[in-house]
């Protein structure tokens, strides 16, 4: 059996993020979330970015979020395209987003698939990286130094939600996937721009609450300190009296 490859993180920005382990992220599915899904996309010329996506990505990054694509790509295991062809698709996607000032920070993909449908034996594997398992999210967080507890997972299927929930993210389910009875998202939205708006509002609300708490803590620290008054719970011992 051929030696399996790890999922590729396609970004020139990944190494400059590792110095700040407290940064939050928005992990986002690719197909039917950021781009239209023609089915096992292998041709870069077929990429169609969905309306409002570049602006949403740009606003999230300007607000301090790291934006990371997390995508299953079983087409590699099925023999529909190679990893090299997939990389060309992702490079073109980055170029198209960058033209609008909205390139993502990294792209993680899982080429593996269990069972007979994986005709390429090197990729026939029930990998922990394949959603609904959280492996890609955990690996991206480790590689890029991200705070999962402050992060979000956004996608259009129950497997996106399950991966995010198991990793410890807050989750948003999009579009038609919101009716899936097996999905347990924290929130549902119509599309990715709407999800970005919600994430930014929540981020602002949390920051304002934290600012209030910090101000109260500073005020408490500035208040004059009083010496504690020691109160004994023991009754005083009276001297013994001589008998009458």
Image: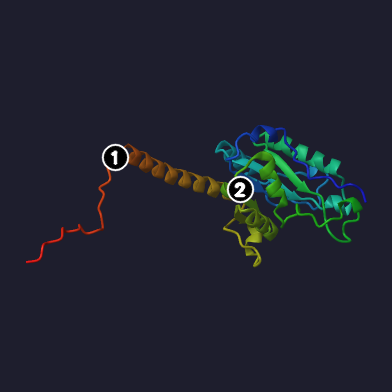
Work out whether mark 2 precedes mark 1 in sequence or the reverse, and give the earlier one.
2
Provide residue 213's location: percent of width, then percent of height: 40, 45
Indicate which label's residue lies in the foreground, 2 or 1.
Answer: 1
Provide residue 228's location: percent of width, then percent of height: 28, 45
Disc 1: CA contacts within 10 A as few (<14), some (14-19) or many (>=20):
few
Provide residue 54's location: percent of width, then percent of height: 64, 40
Residue located at (84% from left, 44% from top): 83
Q: In this view, does 75 lie above or below 142?
A: below
Which of the 4 image quadrants contains residue 165?
A: bottom right
Q: Which quadrant is home to the C terminus?
A: bottom left
Residue located at (74% from left, 45% from top): 108
Residue 219 visible in this rendered orientation of the protein = yes
Q: Residue 230 vs residue 52: left or right?
A: left
Q: Name the residue under label 2.
A: 148
Which residue ends up furthest to the right in the rendered image? 1
Q: Do the residues labelled 2 and 1 touch (CB within 8 Å)?
A: no
Q: Residue 46 vs residue 210: left or right?
A: right
Which of the 4 image quadrants contains residue 233?
A: bottom left
Which residue ends up furthest to the front in the rendered image? 243
Residue located at (85% from left, 40% from top): 84
Disc 2: CA contacts within 10 A as few (<14), some (14-19) or many (>=20):
many
- Give me the C-alpha separation between circle 2 and circle 1: 39 Å
Provide residue 101's location: percent of width, then percent of height: 64, 33
Secondary-structure class at tag 2: helix
Q: Which of the two residues, 43 or 17, is positioned nearer the viewer here?
A: 17
Q: How many marks?
A: 2
Q: Is residue 188 above or below residue 5?
A: below
Q: Residue 15 bears which disc, if any?
A: none
Q: Residue 225 bears which disc, if any?
A: 1
Secondary-structure class at tag 1: loop
Residue 35 visible in this rendered orientation of the protein = no
The image's colour scheme reads rainbow
């Amino acid at each position: 059996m051929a030696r399996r490859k790890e999922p590729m993180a396609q970004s020139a920005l990944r190494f400059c993020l590792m110095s700040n382990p407290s940064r939050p992220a928005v992990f986002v599915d690719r197909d039917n979330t950021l781009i239209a899904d023609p089915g096992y996309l292998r041709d870069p010329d077929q990429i169609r970015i969905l309306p409002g996506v570049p602006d949403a990505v740009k606003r999230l990054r300007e607000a301090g979020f790291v934006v990371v694509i997390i995508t299953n790509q079983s087409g590699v295991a099925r023999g529909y395209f190679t990893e090299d062809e997939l990389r060309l698709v992702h490079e073109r996607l980055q170029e198209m987003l960058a033209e609008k000032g909205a390139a993502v920070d990294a792209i993680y993909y899982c080429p593996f698939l269990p069972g007979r449908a994986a005709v390429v034996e090197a990729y026939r594997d029930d990998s922990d990286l394949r959603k609904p398992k959280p492996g890609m999210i955990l690996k991206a967080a480790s590689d890029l130094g991200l705070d999962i507890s402050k992060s979000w997972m956004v996608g259009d299927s129950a497997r996106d939600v399950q991966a995010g929930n198991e990793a410890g993210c807050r989750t948003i389910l999009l579009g038609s996937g919101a009716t899936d009875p097996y999905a347990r998202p924290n929130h549902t939205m119509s599309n990715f721009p709407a999800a970005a708006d919600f994430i930014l509002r929540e981020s602002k609300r949390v920051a304002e609450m934290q600012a209030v708490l910090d101000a109260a803590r500073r005020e408490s620290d500035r208040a004059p300190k009083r010496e504690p008054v020691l109160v004994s719970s023991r009754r005083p011992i009276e001297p013994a009296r001589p008998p009458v």
